[in-house]
Amino acid sequence: MPIKTELWRIDHGLEKVPSSSLEAESRLEAAIDADIGVIDPNLMIIGRQVQTPFGKYIDLLAINPSGDLVVLELKRNKTPREVVAQILDYATWVQELKYDAIASIYNAYAPHSEFETAYAQHFGGPPPEEINQQHRLLIVAAEMDNATERIVNYLSTAFGVPINVVFFQYYRVDGGEFLARSWLIDPAQAEVQAEKGARLRGKELWNGSDFYCSFGEGPRRSWKDAITYGFISAGGGKWYSHTLAMLTSGARVFVFIPQTGYVGVGKVLEEVKPVSEFTVEINGTPTPILNAPLVANAMGENANDPELCEYLVRIQWESTRPLEEAIWEKGMFANQNSACKLRNKFTLERLYEHFSLNT
C-alpha cells in the first residue's frame, strides 16, 4: 500500500489538516538544497542540476561522511517507470566518478569554495582516501503510487539495489508552513538490503549490526572509566564525534584502542549524548558523569561547546579486556573513524572467537 502522512489539529476538536502535494513538489528542491538535514543531517550537497554525459540533469547530488555519493531525484510529474528508470540511469554514471570529477562537480556548484575545504567544514575532517566506493539512490516525492512502491521494493529486496523513496507533504496552518517526512523503506532496513547488493557486486557484506569503534585513550577519555560506567566516547571536533550518531539502540560495537588492539564488545543501550547530559549510577543514584570519580580528569573539557565537547554512547558490555590483553592480529581491520560498519570477515571471525561469541 502507498505510504501517506496525515495531520490532525486537536486544539479546537479533531480537524484534519489538508496537504498539498503540488505545493510540496514545486518547492522541495530549493528546500532540500538549502538544508539537506531535512532528509539526513549526515549529507552534504555537492551539486544541483548536475549534467550527465547523456544530456540529462541530476536534481541534487550529495555526499556522506564515508565518501559515498547520494543521488536525489524529484518525482515531479514523471511516471513511476520514468523516475525509477531515470535514477538508475544516473547511477550508471555516478558509480564511475573519481575524486577529481567529484571535486569539479562541487566547484561548479559552489565556485567560490574548494571541495576539500567545504567537506572539512561540514564533516569536521578531510575526505576519505577512498571516495565513492558505494552510492545511494533516493527518489523524493510528495505522494506515492502502487507501481513505484512495487518497483522500488523489488529492486531493494530482491537485488540489493541501494534505492529508497522519501515523501514530503506540505501543510499550511494559521499562516505557518510545515513539511512532514516519511520513508517507503525504513532507512536502516534499506541499508541492510544495500549491503546485500554490495556483496553481489564483490564487496564485503555488512551484517546489519556490528560496528567498529575507535576509542582514543588520553586525558579526555579512559578505557577504565568506559568499563566502569558503560560507555564509549569521542570528541575534540565534529570529525571525531559525528560518526557516533550511526550507533542506534541494539547495535553491537567492537572497541579498538589505537596502537593497542580490540579490548571490548558490547550492545548500544542509548544513542549518543553530549557529556553534559550523560549520567551514571553512583550507589544507585543517577549522577552526571562529570561529577563521578574519573580517571580521565579532562573529560569535561569544552563541555559547553557542542563542536568540541566529548560525546558518549551508553553500552552494555558483553566482554572487556585490560589494555595489556588487547586482541590484534595482522590483517585485522582498523581505521581512524570513531564509528563505522565492521564488514571485514577475517576481523569478525577472529573477534567472535576471542570474545567467545556465536554470531
Image (cartoon, grey):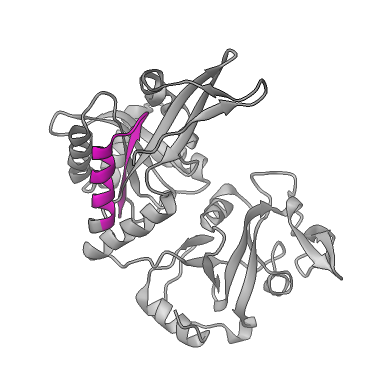
Q: Nearer the viewer, residue 206 or 99?
A: 206
Q: Nearer the viewer, residue 278 or 74?
A: 74
The range drawn in magenta is 133-157
Tell me: residue 126, above or below residue 208. above
Image side of residue 246 versus residue 48, left or right: right
Q: Is residue 291 magenta?
A: no
Q: Quadrant of residue 272?
A: bottom right
Q: Residue furthest front?
A: 13
**Residue plotted at (41% across, 46% down):** 64
Q: Quadrant of residue 227?
A: bottom right
**Residue plotted at (71% across, 61% down):** 220
Q: Residue 112 appears at what percent x and percent y? A: 41, 26
Image side of residue 44 versus residue 198, left or right: right
**Residue plotted at (37% across, 25% down):** 29
**Residue plotted at (24% across, 51% down):** 154
Tell me: residue 279, above or below residue 225. above
Q: Residue 24 appears at what percent x and percent y? A: 41, 22
Q: Nearer the viewer, residue 197 or 154?
A: 154
Q: Is residue 156 magenta?
A: yes
Q: Residue 141 appears at what percent x and percent y? A: 35, 31
Image side of residue 242 versus residue 349, left or right: right
The answer, for residue 113, to whether it is visible in the render is no
The answer, for residue 345, to whether it is visible in the render is yes
